Amino acid sequence: MVDITQKQSTNRTAIAQAIVKVSSMVTIDAIKKGTVPKGDVFSMSKAAGFLGVKKTADLLPDCHPLPVEHCAIEYEINGLDIIVKVMVKTFYKTGVEVEAMHGASVVALNMYDMLKPIDKGVEIHHIKLLKKTGGKSDIENI
């Protein structure tokens, strides 16, 4: 693990995305109507994403445990694509980019798991960092 003992704590934010692509509007309709057999896809996936963000350091050996002070998960449906955005904030010595990307990944995997009984063509795409602020570099619109 990188030594961060001499670093200053600053406000840090990261926004990551994942795109879940389904193969049919029937799947999108089932999500919207709440008729997916495994339950409410958006609520369950949001809960899974929160756990993913908070457990990042438990699963990725070089990640520092850090205080997650805010996490928000949003969805946007665009045709057959469900765009997942995860924002994570903290006041700490290291950034939250990996936590945000991990959260987006977990949301997407949970959606895949919930949708696979009704759609065999679900795919996960474009897990990436969209924005980070704080620390020695601010990066926007990556």
Image (cartoon, rainbow, N blue to C red):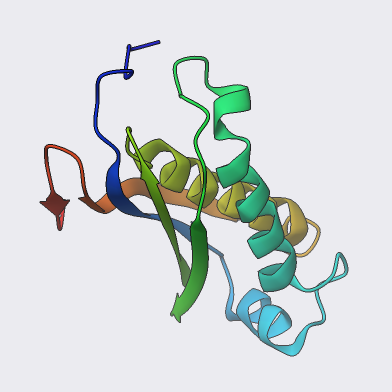
Q: Is residue 141 above or below residue 102?
A: below
Could you say where residue 2 lies in the image, as x and y percent from the top left?
Answer: 33, 12
Answer left or right for 12 relative to 98: left
Could you say where residue 86 lies in the image, as x and y percent from the top left?
Answer: 45, 59
Answer left or right for 136 relative to 106: left
Q: Residue at point 24% right, 26% down? A: 7
Can the viewer see residue 120 in this picture? no
Q: Is residue 77 above or below residue 91?
A: below
Q: Is residue 6 above or below residue 109?
A: above
Q: In the rendered image, which quarter contains the N terminus?
A: top left
Q: Is residue 8 above or below residue 139?
A: above
Can the viewer see residue 102 in this picture? yes
Could you say where residue 56 lies in the image, as x and y percent from the top left?
Answer: 56, 33
**Residue 81 quadrant:** bottom left
Answer left or right for 72 relative to 9: right
Quick one: 32 or 17, which is closer to the camera?
17
Q: Which residue reaches farthest right? A: 37
Q: Residue at point 66% right, 74% down? A: 27
Q: Which residue reaches farthest bottom? A: 33
Q: Residue at point 43% right, 44% down? A: 101
Q: How many marks?
A: 0
Could you say where residue 83 lies in the image, as x and y percent from the top left?
Answer: 43, 67
